[in-house]
Image: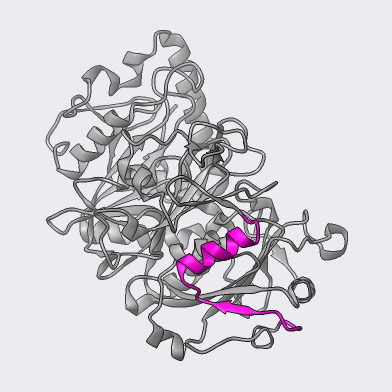
Amino acid sequence: MKQLTAAMLGIAGNGKVYRNLAIPALVEKALKNGEGRLSDTGALVVETGKYTGRSPDDKFIVDTPSVHDEIAWGKINVPISPERFEKIKGKMLAYLQNKEIYVFDGFAGADPKYTQRFRIINEFAAQNLFIHQLLIRPTEEQLEDYEPDYTVIAAPGFNCVPEIDGTHSEAAIIINYETREVIIAGSRYCGEIKKSVFSVMNYVLPKKGVLPMHCSANIGDNGESAVFFGLSGTGKTTLSADPARKLIGDDEHGWSPDGVFNIECGCYAKCIGLEHEREPDIYEAIRFGAILENVIVDEKGRPDYHDGTLTENTRAGYPINYIKNAAIPGMGGQPKTIIFLTADAFGVLPPISKLDNDMAMYHFVSGYTSKLAGTERGITEPVTTFSTLFGAPFFPLSASVYATMLGKKLEETGAGVYLVNTGWCGGAAGTVPRMKLSYTRAMVTAALEGKLNDVEYVKDPIFNLNIPKSCPGVPAEILDPRNVWKDKAAYEASAKNLAKKFAENFAKKYPDMPENIVKAGPRG
């Protein structure tokens, strides 16, 4: 394997560069550097400090002539000048001089037709371990003539100065699509690296005729794939880890003319409240080579997955082959079932409802959920949000680009689409327990197996959704939230309030949407 020097990476000094170290060596380095400790199962446990989740307010895209007219500029895709980018990058490279540097050269995109090469340059061995396990690992032969398509530099110890650098804080995540570079400053949260790769793929793949998706995916014995859309904390990882189906991936995928493929080859699961009985596959995947973020462990290294002292957004990163029934190399056929996941904090959306194609387009671009505590900085309790495409922070192009692609996919494949509420039902969050995972699994299984195709449905008059009157393994009375709420007047008021928020969001963001899609939404 060709050795890299600091100079080859643009870094001055004589710092040692470690390229594609083996997992044991990376763990050893992280322990020696005081970056973490081992759990009782051998996972590396680290704390990420101030940043225990993504920091979307610190994300920027370099505004260059070649991409200016492509990017959907606004609150999410915030411009920064090429000059500021170069100055920050220059200071970051100077900060890294004479330090030990960890490099991972790997791939994103399991389908070779659409693979992109990513070079990840890390200040910390622990973060390099994470991305080594999350991306696709090359062979020794592939490394011989490896040249990256994109380079990501992550230096958490380098802090920006907002008054000088034009950033919002000491942290900054900046993507330069023209020079094919990403820099990440000030944050140890591993998710920033992972989502930066995803953001790049969301720019690249549509140009190749592939719909990038913030989703998990699995595949049945019959070869039919299923796709689970949803924001962080809505259940993508949990629900796609189905012992009866093979896991394609838990978070990021492409939908090509040939089917679905995983962009990564690892998983990044939320593990607050993790229990072996409820999620055995994830629980057993947290072993040597895995990395735990912000999980409290005792003096014997035993994790307390119920302790959210540092954050509710505790995380476990591990390679997908740690899951017993993973589909390797992360590819599947055309999906026959699409699941939109939401965690409704108002407790008024039905646990499951069937969508026609117009309804599907409405809810895809709406992307409603309640952001759960800890997934982003400053979120301490559920907050209602509408995130376009169930992942607005990661999509640089206009929502219409991705939405149009999905619409065509649904028409071509005839896939069935369901909206599943994994949040609360019968009352607002904090007043009633969250929906039982066993019920949600039963509903999803029924959808995947076609057992909801011929049942009787009733139309919800407020949300304009088709609610099944029965579902195998689920008490019929909980399928319609009206039946669960004790105070019917309170339900009516809360439901109409949420329906109004849907309408206001849609009118504001999508004023030119076709009338048939507008009418497919809640009616209030």
Q: Is residue 374 above or below residue 498?
A: below
- Total marks shown come to 0
Q: Quadrant of residue 409?
A: bottom left
Which scheme is used to colour this image of the protein? one colour
**Where in the figure is residue 101, as x and y percent of width and height?**
64, 74
Between residues 324 and 206, which one lies in front from this camera angle? 324
The quarter in which the C terminus is drawn is top left
In the displayed image of the protein, which residue is found farthest to the front?
A: 300
Q: Is residue 396 visible?
A: no
Between residues 434 and 484, which one lies in front from this camera angle? 434
| Residue drawn at the location 33% of the way across and 39% of the way down | 279
**Left or right of residue 243, residue 18 in this image:** right
Q: Is residue 377 above or below residue 336?
A: above
Q: Is residue 345 visible?
A: yes
| Residue drawn at the location 75% of the way across and 63% of the way down | 158
Between residues 434 and 155, which one lies in front from this camera angle? 155
**Where in the figure is residue 218, as x and y percent of width and height?**
27, 54
**Where in the figure is residue 8, as x and y percent of width and height?**
64, 88
**Left or right of residue 164, residue 61 in this image:** left
Magenta-colored stretch includes residue 92: no
**Left or right of residue 364, residue 298 in this image:** right
Magenta-colored stretch includes residue 13: yes
Residues in magenta, as a range: 11-35
Q: Quadrant of residue 190?
A: bottom right
**Where in the figure is residue 54, as x and y percent of width and height?**
60, 50
Between residues 384 and 29, which one lies in front from this camera angle? 29
